[in-house]
Image (spheres, rainbow, N blue to C red):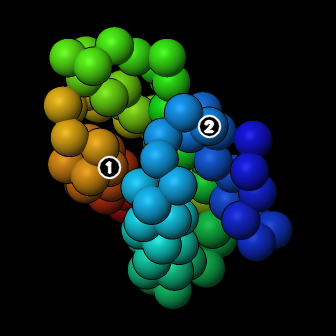
Amino acid sequence: MVQLGGNINVDGFETVSRNDFVIVKKLVGSFVKTVSDKYPTFKNCNLILVNPEKEKNDEFQLRLSLGLDQEFSAEVNDSNLYFAFNKVCKEIEGKLP
């Protein structure tokens, strides 16, 4: 598990290329900044690559949980890591008050 700042945890990305991981970290940071600016009760964010040992043709399975006053979580699958991240963020945003 990699901790980004004090309230962002990213796990399961050890097998992802270094370049992809750098981009994922920036995307997560940007998403958390947006959420924390809008919701002062923001506590933490956990992003997990559920299937880090995926085969070449498998989809990425991402799970995102966001702690505010209550816990919000979503899980998505996509063949593209960045599209999967975008989908999971949109799903979380749809659940927020």
Choose top left, top right, bottom left or bottom right for residue 27.
Answer: bottom left
Label 1 vs 2, first from the N-terminus? 2
In the image, residue 55 sits, relative to residue 48, either above or below, namely above
- Residue 56 image position (x, y, % from top left): 27, 19
What residue do we see at 74% from left, 51% from top? 2
What residue do we see at 37% from left, 60% from top? 97
Can residue 13 be seen in this snapshot?
yes
Closer to us: 4 or 66: 4
- Residue 80 image position (x, y, % from top left): 20, 40
- Residue 66 image position (x, y, % from top left): 55, 51
Closer to us: 20 or 27: 20
The residue that label 2 is drawn on is 14
Closer to us: 20 or 82: 20
User: What type is the residue that disc 2 sits on?
Assistant: Glu
Please give left or right for residue 91 compared with residue 23 in the image: left
Q: Residue furthest bottom?
A: 37
In the image, residue 18 sits, relative to residue 56, either above or below, namely below
The residue that label 1 is drawn on is 85
